[in-house]
Amino acid sequence: MSAGTEQVIAKIHQEFAGFPGRAGAAATNLVTGEEIRVNAEAETATASTIKVPILIELFRQVEAGTVKLDDMLTYTAASRVPGSGILRDLLPEIVLSVENLATLMIIVSDNSATNMLIDLVGPDKVNDAMTALGFGRTRLVQRIDFPAIGDDPRNLAVTTAGELAGIMAALATGAILTPASCEAILEIMRKQHFTNLVPRYLPYSPYAKELDQPDNGLRIATKTGGWTDMRADMSLVEWPAAAGLARYVIGISIEHSPDTRFWSENTGDQLIGRVSRLIFEHFGGGILDTTPDTASEQPAATTQAVP
């Protein structure tokens, strides 16, 4: 382990030491193979990060020919699930393609769309796929059912920070599914609306091209998860570098945070943002404009409702 790696790990330990709950982080530089791991094997709740394994199993079934992305499903009153998303606020009897439901599940973390897709692919199939892919500690316990989940988000699903990062690495390197399916999943994740965790303090503007603004080339495929006292994120971070595309993956989670508010300045959100920035700068992100003024100008997106 290099001195630089030891230093960034020490800084992450320091950040976590000041947090009264539990925290874990894992990151891998996909160019050099360098790894950063702090409490990476500790079990944690997933909240909405479990939606990425659901998406992976969906695409596996698409590849197998048992499901088609253009199959149509009807959102009904019985499909409505509270928490994050927009279907809960729309009138029922909306007919949506499987692809659109998958997009809603990720980019606005739609819980109703998620349960519709869990019913489609089968919860056991999600877990079987994770085990087969080498991520046996990532388990979907049940559909999103808040009374059944109660106060413990682990009653929804569990994972580790290391497996969150590992799943992202498998997608980024094409180690699972076909290259086309992996890229399709990552492209959906690049559209996520919630940028308040891993991207929080990075010089990242998802709308630069649309607004005809200067674009530093930083791209982030990400999926957040949040419960009252926990947060998680799994991301692929990429940007152009002199030697080619710089890219790394990160998985991070916190539990038992004393700040249970869903607001942009949640202390757990900020902690994840600070650790993310440490890793970004260590892996070479300092070549971009990462001054404090730039970081402070990045608006934190509205925090997603549970999960």
Image: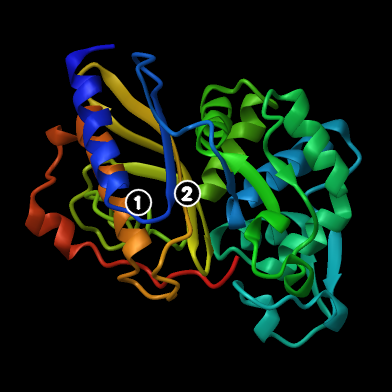
Residue 299 lies left or right of residue 54; in this view the side is left
Answer whether residue 191 is visible to the viewer in this image.
no
Residue 229: % across, % down: 49, 65
Residue 201: % across, % down: 24, 53
Image marks 1 and 2: residues in contact by CB distance under 8 Å:
yes
Find residue 193 and name its label.
none
Residue 221 lies left or right of residue 34; in this view the side is right
Tell me which numbered mark, 1 or 2, is placed earlier along the sequence.
Answer: 2
The amino acid beneath tag 2 is: Asp
Q: Nearer the viewer, residue 226 or 207?
A: 226
Residue drawn at point x = 54 percent, y = 41 percent: 186
Query: Looking at the rendering, in which quadrant would you find the C terminus?
Result: bottom right
Residue 146's image quarter? Answer: bottom right
Image colouring: rainbow
Q: Secondary structure at mark 1?
A: helix
Q: Secondary structure at mark 2?
A: strand
Gap in angstroms between the C-alphas marked 1 and 2: 8 Å
Residue 2: % across, % down: 23, 12
Find residue 272 and name its label.
1
Residue 230 lies left or right of residue 76; in this view the side is left
Residue 237's image quarter? Answer: top left
Q: Is residue 156 above or below residue 15?
A: below
Q: Is residue 307 above or below residue 117?
A: below
The amino acid beneath tag 1 is: Ile
Residue drawn at point x = 21 percent, y = 43 percent: 216
Q: Is residue 14 above or below residue 118?
A: above
Answer whether residue 268 is visible to the viewer in this image.
yes
Residue 80's image quarter? Answer: bottom right
Q: Nearer the viewer, residue 215 or 197?
A: 197
Residue drawn at point x = 24 percent, y = 58 percent: 212
* Mark 1 or mark 2, whichever is nearer to me: 1
Residue behind mark 2: 233
